[in-house]
């Protein structure tokens, strides 16, 4: 098994389904990853050590999955120069809005990229784009994914049941 290029860090095991979906997208792009649980509040030393050791272990991007106060992405970013992408999780009484705001409202000098609430696929694709800066093979996999996505949309035009549909000529250059 190749060494992981992406580290997925969950704030708690309750985030495992988001981590699985993130991993599925990374798998489809042939990007090796690892996953772990480390809490910014309950095991802050583990978070700091993970961030500090990640680059030396070959990790190129860290994806942090956290709900509620979502401190995890910022704590990771404060202890590494690697890109950190936050996935805010839908949880608590605010439906993930608190996690989203906590993820995007980082102080100057502690950048964290954020995707939508529960945005596992986009986090994986953004990590792939970052890795793809140094890998033609990864860029090719991303293009293949996009081509497949485009074809799914085009095919869905034939599944509009009884609605009158636009002719193919509407999409000609």
Image (tube, rainbow, N blue to C red):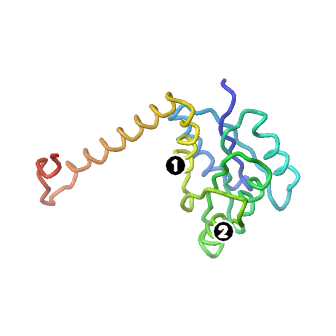
- Seen from this angle, which residue lies furthest front? 109
As rendered, which of 112 and 38 lies closer to the eye?
Answer: 112
* Residue at numbered disc 2: 105
Residue at 86 percent of width and 55 percent of height: 43
Residue 81: horizontal and vertical position, in percent? 73, 47
Counting from the top left corner in percent of width and height, residue 31 is at 58, 33
**In terms of depth relative to the viewer, which is nearer, 134 or 24?**
134
Q: Identify whether 89 is placed above or below 22.
A: below
In this view, 69 is above or below 77: below
- Label 2 Cα neighbours within 10 Å, binned few <14 / some 14-19 / many ≥20: some
Label 1 sits on residue: 121
Q: Position of residue 105 (x, y in %)?
A: 66, 68
The foreground one among 115 and 10 is: 115
Closer to the chain start, of discs 2 and 1, is 2
Numbered disc in front, either 2 or 1: 2
Q: Secondary structure at mark 2?
A: loop
- Residue drawn at x 19%, y 55% is 161
Dots 2, 1 in contact, CB < 8 A: no
Q: Residue 100, relative to residue 130: is it above or below?
A: below
Name the residue located 54 percent from the left edge and 47 percent from the top edge: 126
The local secondary structure at tag 1 comes to: helix
- Which mark is on residue 6? none
Q: Position of residue 74 (x, y in %)?
A: 73, 59
Report crowding for label 1: few under 14, some 14 to 19, many 20 or more residues within 10 A (C-alpha). many
Q: Is residue 171 left or right of residue 64?
A: left
């Amino acid at each position: 098994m190749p060494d992981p290029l992406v580290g997925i860090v969950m704030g708690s095991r309750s985030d495992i389904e988001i981590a699985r979906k993130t991993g599925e997208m990374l798998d489809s792009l042939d990007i090796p990853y690892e996953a772990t649980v480390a809490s910014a509040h309950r095991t802050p030393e583990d978070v700091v050590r993970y961030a500090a050791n990640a680059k030396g272990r070959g990790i190129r991007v860290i994806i942090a999955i956290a709900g509620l106060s979502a401190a995890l992405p910022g704590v990771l970013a404060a202890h590494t120069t690697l890109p950190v992408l936050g996935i805010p999780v839908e949880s608590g009484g605010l439906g993930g809005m608190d996690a989203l705001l906590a993820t995007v409202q980082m102080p100057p000098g502690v950048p964290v990229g954020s995707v939508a609430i529960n945005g596992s696929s986009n986090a994986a694709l953004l990590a792939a784009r970052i890795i793809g800066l140094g890998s033609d093979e990864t860029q090719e996999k991303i293009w293949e994914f996009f081509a497949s996505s485009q074809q799914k949309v085009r095919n869905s035009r034939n599944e509009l049941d009884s609605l009158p549909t636009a002719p193919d000529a509407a999409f000609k250059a």
